[in-house]
Image (cartoon, rainbow, N blue to C red):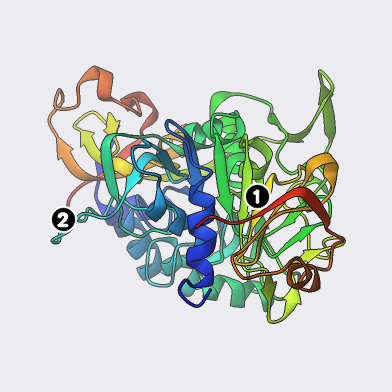
Amino acid sequence: MKTIPLQQAVDLIPDGATVMIGGFMGVGTPERLMDELVRRGRRNLTVIANDNAVPGVGIGKLISAGAVKKTIASHIGLNPETQKKMLAGELEVELVPQGTLIERIRAGGFGLGGVLTPTGVGTLVENGKQRVEVEGKAYLLEPPLRADFALVQAFFADYIGNLYYALTGRNFNPVIAMAADTVIAEADNIVPVGVIAPDHVITPAPVVDYIVSHA
Amino acid sequence: MNAMDAQTIIARRIAQELRDGMLVNLGIGIPTLVSTFVPPGARVYFQSENGLIGTGAPPAGGMNHPLLTDAGGRPVGALPGACTFDSAMSFGLIRGGHVDMTVLGALQVDAGGRLANWMVPGKMVPGMGGAMDLVCGAKRVVIAMQHTAKGQPKIVKECSLPLTSVRPVDLVVTELAVIGFPGGRATLLETAPGVTVEQVCQATEAELVVSPRISTMVL
């Protein structure tokens, strides 16, 4: 793990990259990275995240700035700009049930070839997917998801990159931290090694590539 | 009826389905109101699918925490004994059958209890969020909705909107009636005070079986 200034962190992320972003309605989203991606005018990103937040918050900033070509999310209903751009054909949206989305990411990060879930059987979600019966019950085979980058927001990061999340800021963060080639974490607090007790480390340091240093 | 608005009738009636020790997930809108009417003495665990069991009212006096929110991103409190977790655990709880009851809104419910609540093609495509997983995995699915929308029945013969799940819901509570689906058929179980069976049937497109044990909602 290396610490890295914000600008250099965003230098790593090219136009067209596939990026997983933590957060749920903007709660637990790395906001400084969002702001810097917008400031640098990134384009054609594919964003994999639970939702698109609202304009002006979290991923909503990327949507408003036109940085996103495609989003894979479970819910976009609270961001009218996503709706508008989707209907205008400027933004591709792939909707995935929330429990399926997080399991596809988990499969991608945990070395699995996908998951079998009953969610979506007999609905539009089944279109184009393989149905598999196990012990008489129907499941959909959902493929794994991975990304070039995971942008993670932690509450504590220690000096070697162990991460701890607080309250409902955890959400997708520890799961996406397992599923990307390069993991970049922002933290509310960067603390000495040992402040996060071994039992309280949620994301182990070896999977974290960069911690964004303070400005 | 005048004394109580539609949403309050629905929420109070559904709250009577709550039991001590239940793990319950409430959708946004009318379902959220159900938590206001928990029966006295019952400890009910409310789950927010963004990663919290023990969701409570937001703290008073400017003590909100930006990282303590419900699934709509609004500030909440955490009751003593609350716990937090990531989204894989949250949906493991939901899909894995650990949630005793979910209360959700609906666009349509059909005669067999099948639910449509996540999109109106070409008009409104908010996404399913956690709804498909909840209907698939919760032990009991209760629908909280107004009986009609702009005068049009929401309990229909067959859903014209995309289904949320093929698994039928267990109970529909509106400001007019309580409807169950024993044997896969929409059955009128209770009417709201001052509402007749005929009024309910008129406001319903699906054919309703009238339960021999039909009663009036106690609110």
> Which residue in the structure is indicated by mark 2?
B63
| Type of amino acid under label 1 | Val
Residue A6, label in figure:
none
Kindly identify which chain the residue marked by label 1 belongs to: A
Which residue is rendered at x = 59% and y = 35% of the image? A103
Above/below status of B182 relative to B76: above
Q: Where A182 falls versus B58 (above or below)?
A: above
Instruction: Answer with left or right where residue A115 lies relative to residue B103.
Output: right
Of the pair A214 and A122, the residue shown nearer to us: A122
Q: Is residue A141 above or below residue A65?
A: above
Q: Which of these two is toward me, A175 or B52?
A: B52
Q: Chain of mark 2?
A: B
B131 to the left or right of A1: right
Is disc 2 placed on a helix, strand or loop? Answer: loop
Picture residue at 68% right of the left edge, 60% below the top = B117
Q: Is residue B138 above or below residue B114?
A: above
State which quarter of the image contains the N terminus of chain A: top left
For residue A32, side relative to residue B135 (left or right): left
On the image, the x and y values in percent for residue A22 come to 42, 47
Residue B115 coordinates in the image, percent (x, y): 73, 54
User: Which image quarter: residue B196?
Assistant: bottom right
Count all numbered tags in the image, as a single digit: 2
Residue nearest the viewer, comparing A144 with B77: B77
Label 1 sits on a secondary structure element that is loop
Residue type at mark 2? Met
Quadrant in which the C terminus of chain A appears: bottom left
Residue position marked by numbered label 1 in the rendering: A96
The x, y position of residue A33, in whole percent, is 34, 56
Crowdedness near tag 1: few (<14), some (14–19) or many (≥20) residues, C-alpha within 10 Å: many
Q: Is residue A107 found left or right of A41 in the rendered image?
A: right
Mark 2 surroundings within 10 Å by alpha-carbon count, few (fewer than 14), some (14 through 19), many (20 or more): few
What percent of the width, then of the height, locates residue B122?
Answer: 75, 74
